[in-house]
Image (cartoon, rainbow, N blue to C red):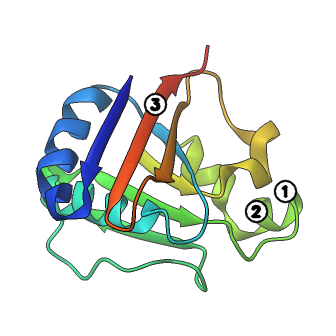
Amino acid sequence: MELIFNLGQIETIAKEFIGILRDQKVVAIHGNIGAGKTTLIHAVCVALGVTENISSPTFSIIHQYGGMHERTIYHIDLYRLKDEQEAINAGVEDCIYSGDLCFIEWPEKISSLLPPGVMHVYLETVQEENRKLIYKVES
């Protein structure tokens, strides 16, 4: 499926995206720097009822949030990691297999750690304020 949207519509897209997620637990979000990965995750977390400060975990690697119905949401940013062993040492694998909702930026760095059934989301800049979102669930 493909969506093209303006960043000003991110709240609406986040709500639409939650409907697409259904029971999905692991979401791998691909895109260049500035494509809107963190912006999308932020908007989805807000739509899921996260009230605490939501920020990029680039330096901490993992942020954990509480959403509606005491649901745990992990936001993982692997940009700074060199390899899968660093991800394992940081506790990424524990988050992925926790059964909680887990958003992963730069998932290509840990491709062999990802479980079957991962939803892959690809974000591209179409114009300065427009993005294209393509998603598929890996079997």
Apparent side of residue 100 relative to residue 111 in the rendered image (left or right)? left
Residue 84 badge: 1
Discs 1/3, front: 3
Q: Residues within 10 Å of mark 3 (few under 14, many from 20)?
A: some
Which percent across, then down, holds residue 139? 61, 13
Q: Say left or right for 15 vs 121.
A: left
Q: Is residue 100 visible?
A: no
* Marks 1/2: CA–CA distance: 5 Å
The local crowd at label 1, few if under 14, some if 14 to 19, many if 20 or more residues have their Cα within 10 Å, is some
Tell me the distance, in whole angstroms, between the alpha carbons under discs 1 and 3: 24 Å
Q: Quarter of the image holding residue 23?
A: top left
Q: Secondary structure at mark 1?
A: helix
Q: Residue reaching furthest front? A: 127
Residue 41 x, y percent position in the rendering:
35, 59
Q: Secondary structure at mark 3?
A: strand
Residue type for callout 1:
Glu
Who's the residue at 42% across and 63% down the image? 36
Which disc, if any, is residue 135?
3
Residue 42 location (% of width, % of height): 30, 66
The residue closer to the viewer here, 92 or 119, is 119
Q: Is residue 137 above or below residue 37?
A: above
Question: Type of residue at label 3?
Answer: Tyr
Front residue (pair 14, 128) = 128
- Image position, residue 29 (x, y; %): 53, 49
